[in-house]
Amino acid sequence: MQADDVRLLKGAAIPTALVGLVVVLVATLMAGGKGALGAAIGVLVVCVFFTVGLVAVSFASRVSPMAMMTAAVVGYAIKILGVMALLKAFESATAFEPKAFGWAAIVCTLAWTVGEMRGFMKLKMLYVEPGGKPPGSR
């Protein structure tokens, strides 16, 4: 990973972890130990899914912009389908509170997305190469 990617990862993961702690505390107060476990699993799932997605996009960006976009779109689809499958699989779980899992996943996804957007805005990445030639010119 490049330094910008690591900064972006930190900018998204740290706020998500902090929001995740709050979600776990709220779930503990509302549903006890099972709520805390469900929320913690939700936080972990979001952090793992989004970190893997960011790493995949980072590596694809070294290949080409088209590969990066493909990795981003496919990664997003896999994350959504994976979270939906976990929500369906855990809807009748008794070891932890499924609603706490669901709410934690939603809240942490929003926190990650906001952190990532903020990170992109702070990176000040160039949209064009300085001194580059326009397409079609020789």
Image (cartoon, rainbow, N blue to C red):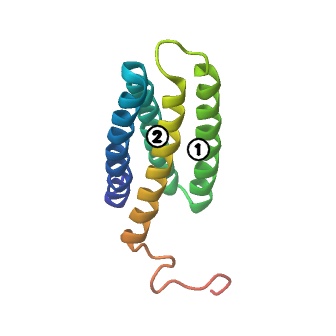
What residue appears at the point 65 percent right and 35 percent down from the top-left corner? Answer: 81
Question: Disc 2 residue type?
Answer: Val
Q: Are marks 2 and 1 in contact (CB under 8 Å)?
A: yes
Which residue corresponds to mark 2?
52
Which residue corresponds to mark 1?
75
Question: Disc 1 residue type?
Answer: Gly
Q: Residue furthest right?
A: 136
* Residue 104 picture location, percent across and down: 47, 37
Give 42 or 124, whichever is nearer the viewer.
42
* Residue 32 picture location, percent across and down: 38, 22
Please, what secondary structure does the residue beneath circle 2 have? Answer: helix
Please, what secondary structure does the residue beneath circle 1 have? Answer: helix
Looking at the rendered structure, the number of numbered marks drawn on it comes to: 2
Give 95 or 15, whichever is nearer the viewer.
95
Sooner in the amino-acid sequence: mark 2 or mark 1 = 2
Relative to 40, does residue 128 appear above or below in the rendering? below
Relative to 98, does residue 44 appear above or below in the rendering? below
Q: Residues within 10 Å of mark 2 (few under 14, many from 20)?
A: some
What residue appears at the point 38 percent right and 53 percent down from the top-left corner? Answer: 12
* Residue 18 picture location, percent across and down: 31, 46
* Residue 37 picture location, percent across and down: 40, 23
Q: Residues within 10 Å of mark 1 (few under 14, many from 20)?
A: some
Give 122 or 29, whichever is nearer the viewer.
29
What residue appears at the point 46 percent right and 18 percent down from the top-left corner? Answer: 96
Relative to 92, does residue 17 appear above or below in the rendering? below
Give 100 or 77, whichever is nearer the viewer.
100
